[in-house]
Image (tube, helix red, strand yellow):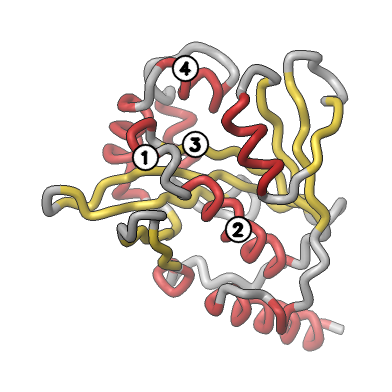
């Protein structure tokens, strides 16, 4: 178990800045973000939505949206990247991940709003994901992307991911990265604390 305080999601928020200095907050999605998250997906170009979900869709189906906005260890975690634009908090990127406890790996999917691609948001989300995965005690990260998604492939390679053949679908490639981060070395403070809590809980159980 991760020992995350799911009743206090705000403590797991992180801040970074874009390449031009814009402040971006990373936080877990909450049920009240449903409408904003749907607007975000509707606002993506058709190509970006296709790259994210491997198919044509104009918005998230209701059942999928409901799953995306409820964070749990069983069904996964959605993280949103937000910026203040014209006085309002706006979603500019999202990251969805799930920890597979038996294999000790974290599976993820990611997207960035078309307007904000190229500003460093995608690489920052991947870097933050490594912190979150390390806090679970994960040993690797992996995600799937379309062979035609050159932007994601380039971003992943620059972030240190390796590309491998997808085991079931020739149209996809798998991007993978091993994790070897000790809890005390996790660079994100909030996730270093979460890792320490998980380690303490494990000691109590044993």
Whole-Å distance between the Cαs marked 2 and 4? 24 Å
Residue at the spot 79% in from the left edge and 50% down from the top edge? 177
Along the line of sight, the residue nearer the viewer: 148 or 104? 148
Q: Which residue is mark 3?
A: 111
Q: Which mark is residue 116?
A: 1
Q: Disc 1, disc 3: CB below 8 Å?
A: no
First in residue order: circle 1 vs circle 4: 4
Nearest-to-viewer mark from 1 and 3: 1
Other-residue count near label 3 (Cα within 10 Å), few / some / many at <14 / 14–19 / ≥20:
many
Residue at the spot 71% in from the left edge and 66% down from the top edge? 134
Q: Which residue is mark 2?
A: 127
Estimate the x, y position of residue 204 in percent, counting from the top left.
Answer: 78, 88
- In the displayed structure, 137 sits above or below 51; it is below
First in residue order: circle 1 vs circle 3: 3
First in residue order: circle 3 vs circle 4: 4
Q: Which residue is mark 4?
A: 47
Q: Secondary structure at mark 3?
A: strand
- In the displayed structure, 38 sits above or below 29; it is above
Whole-Å distance between the Cαs marked 2 and 3? 14 Å
Other-residue count near label 2 (Cα within 10 Å), few / some / many at <14 / 14–19 / ≥20:
some
């Amino acid at each position: 178990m991760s020992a995350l305080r799911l009743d206090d999601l705000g403590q797991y928020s992180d801040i970074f800045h874009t390449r031009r200095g814009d402040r971006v907050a990373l936080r877990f999605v909450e049920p009240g973000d449903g409408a904003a998250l749907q607007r975000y997906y509707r606002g993506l170009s058709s190509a970006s939505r296709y790259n994210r979900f491997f198919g044509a869709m104009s918005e998230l189906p209701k059942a999928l949206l409901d799953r995306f906005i409820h964070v749990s260890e069983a069904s996964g975690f959605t993280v949103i990247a937000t910026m203040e634009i014209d006085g309002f908090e706006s979603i500019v990127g999202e990251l969805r991940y799930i920890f597979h406890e038996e294999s000790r790996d974290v599976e993820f999917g990611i997207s960035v709003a078309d307007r904000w691609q190229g500003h460093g948001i995608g690489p920052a989300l991947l870097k933050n994901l490594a912190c979150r995965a390390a806090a679970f005690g994960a040993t690797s990260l992996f995600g799937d992307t379309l062979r035609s998604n050159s932007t994601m492939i380039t971003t992943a390679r620059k972030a240190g991911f390796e590309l491998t053949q997808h085991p079931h679908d020739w149209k996809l490639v798998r991007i993978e990265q091993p994790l070897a981060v000790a809890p005390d070395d996790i660079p994100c403070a909030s996730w270093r604390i979460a890792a320490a809590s998980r380690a303490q809980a494990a000691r109590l159980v044993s």
